Image (cartoon, rainbow, N blue to C red):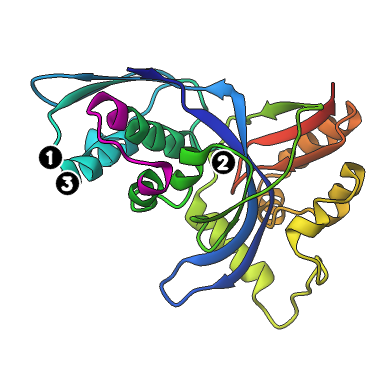
Amino acid sequence: MIVCPNAKINIGLEVVSKRPDGFHDLETVFYPVVELRDVLEVVKAGSFDLIQYGLPCDCPVEKNLCYKAYKAVKERFDIDPVNIYLYKNIPMGAGLGGGSADAAFTIIALNEVFGLGLNKAQMAGIAAGIGSDCPFFIYNRPMLAHGRGEVLEPLDLDLSPYRIEVVTPCLHISTAEAYAGVDALKFTPAAADVYGSEPLAVRLKQDILKWRESVINDFEAVAFAKYSALKDIKKDLYARGAAYASMTGSGSAFYGLFAK
């Protein structure tokens, strides 16, 4: 079976609080970008194997999220071995969710190949054990996300009048480093709440041209402080007519929304 895992962008990404378990509570909107996709094929085989093409990745098989997805399903249903062929086209380490999408679509494919009969909620439950972003890709529609990103609420948001342009710099931003930077900027006595009292979902109902002041990715300030050239990417997107531009995830990719 062949599936095409797609990327996502974050519209707004606010770190709400630090949790006792070391994670952070977030508020963000996940929006699918179906124009940017990997290709993944799952076939029954005598032994498990993962074969990857496209963009290079030095991740060992045991740490690959496709393998973790297969292992999670096998632990529940004792399915036969498979070969997974993965063509990587979504840039890695850029905040576009490619690895999470691959894991979620592996679960979807395994469900079909082995006739497991899982519904989306059941598949999302398995995906949540693999990564915080993974359940979103099971539903693959605009979602307001809370918690670590795994608590999802459907959101009526239609960006079809806009073309989504993704710009991916040739640099990788460490997620751990990004969160440490946000902690230093945001959770201090001098930190100010720049968002006001309105929830993100309410702010997104404003005219899109107002989003640039009220819909903010907390990780941008950290990234700009370390990589000043990233500011130029965002400025260029606006200079070329983007109605809204932002970094996605903890970086380093940016996107612009351009009226079609």
Tell me, yes or no, whether the highlighted magenta stretch contains residue 218. Answer: no
Q: Residues within 10 Å of mark 1 (few under 14, many from 20)?
A: few
Quadrant of image for the C terminus:
top right
Quadrant of image for the N terminus:
top left
Please name which of the two marks, 1 or 2, marks the residue nearer to the observer: 1
Q: Is residue 153 above or below residue 92?
A: below
Picture disc at residue 95: 2
User: Mark 2: which secondary structure?
Assistant: loop
Write the start and end of the magenta stretch as one range. 110-122
Q: CA distance from mark 2 to mark 3?
A: 29 Å
Residue 214: x and y in percent read 84, 56
**Horizontally, is 259 left or right of 23 in the view?**
right
**Horizontally, is 201 left or right of 126 in the view?**
right
Residue 144: x and y in percent read 63, 53
Among the 4 quarters of the image, the one containing residue 9: top right
Q: Residue furthest bottom?
A: 189
Q: Amino acid at mark 2?
A: Gly
Tell me, yes or no, whether the highlighted magenta stretch contains residue 113. Answer: yes
Q: Is residue 209 above or below residue 148?
A: above
Give the labeled residue for mark 1: 78
Give the labeled residue for mark 3: 75
> Foreground: 233 or 62?
62
Residue 171: x and y in percent read 57, 35
